[in-house]
Amino acid sequence: MGRRAVKSDPARGWFSINPATVIIVCALGLTFLGLTILFSASASFKQGPYFYLNKQLVGVAAAAFVCFVVSRIDLDYLREHAWWIGAIVVVALMLVLIPQIGISVKGSRRWLGLGPVRVQVSEFAKLGLVFCLAHYLALSQTRIGEFKRGYVYPLAMIGGVAGLIMLEPDFGTAALTMAVGLVLLFLAGAKWRYVLPTVAAAAGVFTLAVMNNPNRLRRMTEFLSEEKSYHLRQGLAAFAAGGIEGAGLGQGRQQLNYLPEAHTDFIFSVVGEELGLPFTLGVVLLFLIIFVAGLVHLRRAPNLFQYLLVTGCLLLICLQAIVNLGVVTGVLPTKGMSLPFISAGLSNLLLMGFLLGIILNTQRTWGRATLGRKRRAMEEVLA
């Protein structure tokens, strides 16, 4: 008898270890860099250099706990409650808009107070939308070509969540949410003739919203003109001061009352000033590795629901990183958005914990995936 051919696992074509492990290692590297540079960036704050570092350490511990718990959850069981998750997301986004309940900071109402903790609802709304959308599109995959079932209904879900986020107002997060939702809709098999006009219409709505908001309009005109905003000028000055080798940890000067939001939105500029070009390129490389490892991992997806769910998680990490890096380097208009794993902020850290937990969960279960629990009346075509 001849030797029987062994079918190779495509997920191991580029990595000799699990892709999820590669993603976790990259995330840990980015997190450690964030803790290090955050200590330096907050050295001049009146609260002291340990104030934001201690808060970030608490956030990292909470995110690690969330990651572990989510990695052990039965996603099929959680999926049975998808519409409850969607309802909670919508109600929370509405509560934020109520003056007596939502917390307003710098003209934007994005937070809910839970005791001493502030939670940015839109961060978790993005994940809630991805979960519900993946569930719906997987159930409707045989009818995805229909106008109502395959386009109108999912678009209403995407537009509803993005619209509530825009009312806060948070145009950047709304645009990111819309982009992720439309990508998932396209990957599920929606027709080009539906998706492309929607992208154009969304761009038009976004443009009108910017034109009717003086603050956003000013940012856009500054971006298009040669006169850049103060934030961007100081951020670029930090890169220039750092050069190739960097000024050294704790030796940066731009965050000393020159660079606004140095510990959050513009922390990448602090990395450039103090650690130089190798570390800034290293950050970009780590996010690129996360994206490629995620694509390799997706090749093992057993069904459409989990494929779309993990794709959404991957996009929420990588697209947010692209937006932040683009803003800080002047490629995109100025928009406050955290750099995943690095910027200070509890809500974004917790979101990253959820996203990594889902990726780890699927890495653990995809080798023995089934159609789901017997009590759930669902019929899906395996991808």
Image: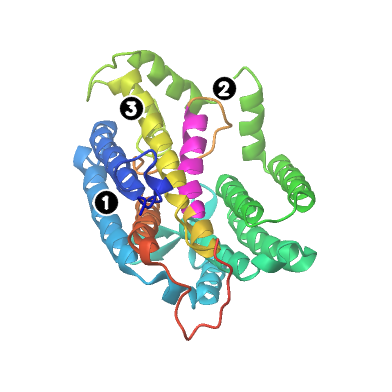
At 42% across and 17% down in the image, what residue appears?
237
Mark 2 secondary-structure assignment:
loop
| Of the pair 268 and 225, the residue shown nearer to us | 268
Is residue 121 something one can see in this rendering?
no
Q: Is residue 103 left or right of residue 188?
A: left
Residue 228: percent from the left, percent from the top? 57, 22
Residue 304: percent from the left, percent from the top? 55, 62
- As drawn, the residue found furthest toward the front would be 1
Q: Amino acid at mark 2?
A: Lys
Q: Residues within 10 Å of mark 1 (few under 14, many from 20)?
A: many
Which residues make up the magenta segment?
Answer: 311-328
| Of the pair 173 and 83, the residue shown nearer to us | 83
Residue pointed to by mark 1:
60
Residue pointed to by mark 3:
271
The verdict on residue 325 being magenta is: yes
Task: Please state, as top left, top right, bottom left or bottom right, where the C terminus lies in the image.
Answer: bottom right
At 35% across and 58% down in the image, what residue appears?
357
Mark 1 secondary-structure assignment:
helix
User: Gap in Å between the C-alphas at discs 3 and 2?
Assistant: 21 Å
Q: Amino acid at mark 1?
A: Val
Is residue 216 something one can see in this rendering?
yes
